[in-house]
Image (cartoon, rainbow, N blue to C red):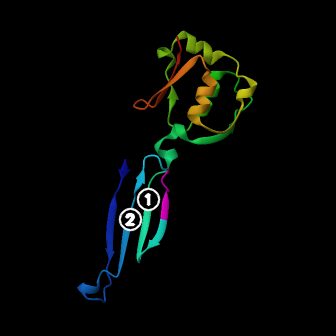
Amino acid sequence: MKHTKILSLLLFSSTSSFAHQVDNPLVIDTSFTETESPITTKISPMNGFTQIVIDTTQEQKKPLETVVTLELPMDITNVGQAMNYVLQNSGFHLQPLSETSSDTIYLYTIDLPLGHRLFYQATINQIIETLAGEGYEVVVNHVRREIQVTPLR
């Protein structure tokens, strides 16, 4: 699906007549497909016009798809702390403990495996799924901006 927004601004010269006032039009075109990662600002000349593409980045639109490289500090000792650390500054949080199953609370208290201390070029969502492990499903509630980790049965 293609989204297109075009805004044309005409820059007028104060010394020219109305017939010549369209000397330097500025065309702003923010066309992109949902699968493309839009460029924050791109300016390119085209046939005497200037095309400027302005949009938010993919990381801003989908913060859990942000690719990061991170090493968890040594003071993080269990899986729950690691998940909270990974989610900090993403705008998302773990489901409140009062709404969390006892199996998931048990997962949060397990010692963090040594192999889960360093993640290289992985999305936040991939890291959370890795920390949860194969026995759990990670469900994202975009309305509440909340991550729910549920055991598979």
Residue 40 in the magenta stretch? The answer is yes
Residue occupied by mark 1: 54
Picture layout, residue 116 above or below residue 121: above
Residue depicted at 46% across the width and 51% down the height: 56
Q: Residues within 10 Å of mark 2 (few under 14, many from 20)?
A: some
- Whole-percent x, y for residue 23 in the image: 34, 82
Residue depicted at 42% across the width and 72% down the height: 50
Residue depicted at 48% across the width and 69% down the height: 44
Question: Tag 1 or tag 2, which sits nearer the N-term?
Answer: 2
Picture layout, residue 83 above or below residue 55: above
Residue 29 in the magenta stretch? The answer is no
Local secondary structure at mark 2: strand
Closer to us: 53 or 147 = 53
The stretch of residues the image draws in magenta is 37-42
In this rendering, would 124 be left or right of 14? right
Residue 86, quarter of the rendered image: top right
- Whole-percent x, y for residue 63 in the image: 51, 40
Picture layout, residue 129 above or below residue 111: below
Residue occupied by mark 2: 28
Label total for image: 2
Amino acid at pointer 1:
Ile
Instruction: Name the residue furthest left.
Output: 18
- Whole-percent x, y for residue 125 in the image: 56, 33
In this rendering, would 151 be left or right of 122? left
Label 2 and label 1: CA atoms lie apart by 8 Å
Residue depicted at 43% across the width and 65% down the height: 52
